[in-house]
Image (cartoon, helix red, strand yellow):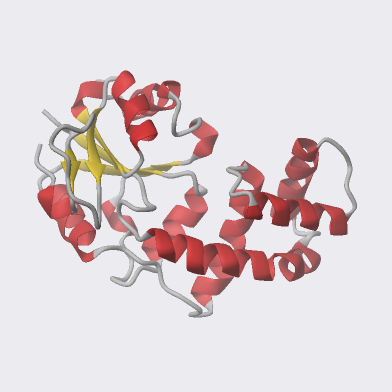
């Protein structure tokens, strides 16, 4: 029996285009000014120090900004980059520059599942802060009360089975009682190796009954 649901964001609860065409370009455009303005803030300074270590040296601020931009352009899942993007997006959300896109079917079913007593969690390559912002400033208002917890790449890569084992340990549940939702086969493969139940979101595609994981066109089609 499923007791908890862990969901991906991009392509699952929310459109890929919102992340790729709105959030990423916004962070890329505003990153240089944000770093220049906030580099002395303890939280930002710690992220810059972490990025410097990952870059293999002590880069000057201008060079470090170029490194961040290069990571963004290469779609790198670098933890300090994701955290810095989250801080920049916070400004955007608070300024009303955009709201977080969430599919209506996702909202409808997440609410129904929570009412049934299921615990809901998020696992995304975006930082926990970025996850909370997207759901906290969503098109449907503040959805964060729906979720019992959030996971990002600090627990491990999304295509690594060990990450899902750690999540199960954190939740204190047998893996078989956790359902993982994603639009990425390799993530679902890793979750299944760890013992999770899986559902493959295939929005705007035709579901394949012979696929490696049960497929669903949207959250309304998910059965468990």
Asked if one can make out residue 194 in the rendered structure from this viewpoint, the answer is no
Q: Quadrant of the C terminus?
A: top left
Residue at 89%, 42% (x, y): give it: 58
In this rendering, the answer to whether 185 lies above or below 84 is: above
Q: Is residue 140 above or below residue 2?
A: below
Q: Position of residue 97 (x, y in %)?
A: 51, 79
Instruction: Name the residue located 40 percent from the left edge and 58 percent from the top edge.
Output: 16
Q: Position of residue 55 (x, y in %)?
A: 79, 40
Q: Is residue 71 left or right of residue 138?
A: right
Where residue 191 appears, as percent x and y from the top left, is: 33, 27
Looking at the rendered structure, the number of numbered marks drawn on it comes to 0
Q: Quadrant of residue 121?
A: top left
The answer to whether 105 appears left or right of 186 in the picture is: left
Foreground of the two, 115 or 12: 12
Which residue appears at 67% of the width and 70% of the height?
30
Q: Is residue 179 left or right of residue 36?
A: left
Q: Nearer the viewer, residue 70 or 101?
A: 70
Asked whether residue 8 appears in the rendered view, the answer is yes
Q: In terms of image quadrants, where is residue 89?
A: bottom right
- Residue 77: give x, y in percent of width and height: 58, 43
Quadrant of the drawing holding the N terminus: top left
């Amino acid at each position: 029996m499923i007791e908890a649901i862990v969901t991906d964001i991009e392509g699952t609860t929310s459109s890929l285009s919102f992340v790729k065409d709105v959030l990423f370009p916004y962070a890329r455009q505003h990153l240089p000014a944000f770093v220049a303005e906030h580099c002395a803030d303890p939280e930002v300074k710690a992220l810059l120090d972490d990025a410097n270590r990952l870059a293999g040296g002590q880069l000057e601020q201008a060079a470090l900004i170029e490194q961040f931009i290069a990571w963004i352009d290469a779609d790198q899942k670098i933890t300090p980059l994701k955290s810095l993007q989250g801080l920049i997006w916070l400004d955007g959300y608070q300024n009303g520059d955009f709201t977080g896109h969430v599919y209506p079917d996702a909202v409808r079913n997440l609410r129904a599942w929570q009412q049934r007593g299921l615990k809901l969690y998020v696992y995304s390559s975006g930082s926990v802060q970025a996850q909370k912002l997207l759901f906290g400033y969503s098109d449907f208002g503040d959805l964060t009360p729906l979720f019992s917890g959030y996971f990002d790449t600090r627990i491990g890569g999304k295509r690594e089975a060990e990450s899902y084992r750690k999540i199960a340990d954190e939740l204190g549940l047998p893996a078989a009682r956790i359902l993982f939702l994603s639009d990425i086969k390799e993530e679902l493969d890793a979750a299944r190796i760890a013992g999770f139940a899986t559902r493959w979101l295939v929005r705007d595609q035709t579901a394949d009954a012979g696929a490696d994981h049960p497929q669903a066109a949207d959250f309304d089609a998910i059965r468990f």
